[in-house]
Image: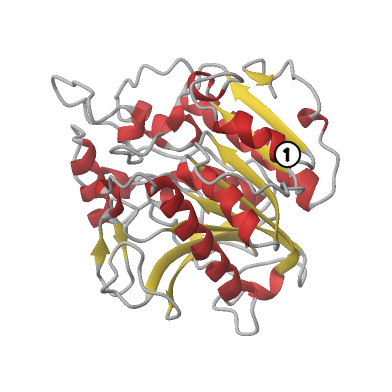
Amino acid sequence: MHLARTTALTLAGLLTLTVPTPPAAAAAPRLPAPTGSHAVGVTSLHLKDASRSDPWVPATKSRELMISLWYPAAGTRGRHRAPYVTPKESELLIRDAELPVAPDTLSKVRTNAFTDAVPTGRKHGLPLVVLSPGLGSPRSSLTSLAEDLASRGNVVVGIDHTYESVATAFTDGRVTTCVACGNKDRDFGEQVVRSRAADVSFVLDQLTGAKPKWRGAALIDRSRIGMAGQSVGGASSIAAMVRDERIRAGVNLDGTTFAPIPERGLARPFLFLGSPTMHSPGGRDGSWGRDWKQLTGWKRWLVVTGAEHASFTDVPLLAEQLGIDLGFALTGARSVEITRTYVAAFFTRHLAGKPQPLLDKPSARYPEVTFGG
């Protein structure tokens, strides 16, 4: 189910990892360079939805969200590389996972995007991709994917679903924690994906409505919106597409889909990309087999040999650089490469309309990726 005690790091198995002594001091971890031709800018926004109370803290009468926008940048001169997380977020994430590293370690991760660089592109010319992380995970856990998609000419919005992350720092100095992580309701999974679908629709309103909150919003092509997510974020991609027809294509990265697709089906393009233990056809999670029948448009079901649940995030890549052995068969660098490549191919095909032979048959370059369904 992937919902019991799940954070960006516990999903990787770090919470129960035994490390007798802290690893030797090393250079700060870094994310791999994006593969596209554009420099990447990033900015963060605080959004408030006064139309609904918070689903996890009902006394909070407005749903507040922090989002990051990654985008093609005109240049980066004079700009600073964006932090991966704030020092306080790093401290809370590391404490939650009981990692044998300094509390500020994750705040020192070297990214490839530059804070508040000037956006560039043709007016209404850039696709928009929404990214939703796993339960307990911050939006930063998908930064490698976000930076790469932006470098290829997309606007990417990562959402911190408040009280569903171990740590979310707001611009006014508040830091919220994961209230939802302790929820034991039987229908908790459905609650999460419904709430996230509402979050996504609200964020789209804020970015593409009459008075958008981002200065580069005029670059967004409102007819070319996609969504991808990991774990429950991937499940939320389906829920958001069912709720909001503006989302034209979706990706589920190894997430159990708690809310079934309605009987009418879902005819828009969809990609399953998962780990073999849970999401091989006939694997432990039957939700993909159920949903596969209800996906009536273009669809692919891909399984990555050697991948684990966290392989579709930055977690294994950063863990390796910190000297922490997760025991994954697939290296962090390779899992990032595969995730970036196949997700980018999917959105290039379905948001940009360019053929992608990679999605049509197995590739000798990526023998780990097998076709199912």
Residue extending furthest toward the front: 263
Kind of element beneath mark 1: helix
Label 1 crowd bin: few (<14), some (14–19), many (20+), radius 10 Å = many
The quadrant in which the C terminus is found is: top right
The quadrant in which the N terminus is found is: top left
Q: Which residue is rendered at x = 48% and y = 21% of the image?
A: 284
Q: Which residue is rendered at x = 25% and y = 69% of the image?
A: 174
Q: In this view, does 153 lie to the left or right of 165?
A: right
Q: Is residue 125 left or right of residue 44?
A: right
> Does residue 92 appear in the picture of this structure?
yes
Q: Mark 1 points at which residue?
A: 345
Q: Which colour scheme is used?
A: secondary structure
The number of callouts visible is 1
Q: Is residue 258 above or below residue 277?
A: below
Q: Which residue is rendered at x = 45% and y = 29% of the image?
A: 309
Q: Is residue 283 above or below residue 347?
A: above
- Residue 165, position in %: x, y? 33, 52
- Residue 242, position in %: x, y? 64, 55
- Residue 203, position in %: x, y? 54, 68
Q: Which residue is rendered at x = 41% and y = 29% of the image?
A: 316
Q: Nearer the viewer, residue 134 or 335?
A: 134
- Residue 152, position in %: x, y? 69, 49
Q: In this view, does 111 lie to the left or right of 237?
A: left
Residue extending furthest toward the left: 20
Three-letter code, disc 1: Ala
> Does residue 42 appear in the picture of this structure?
no
In the figure, residue 60 lies in which quadrant? bottom left
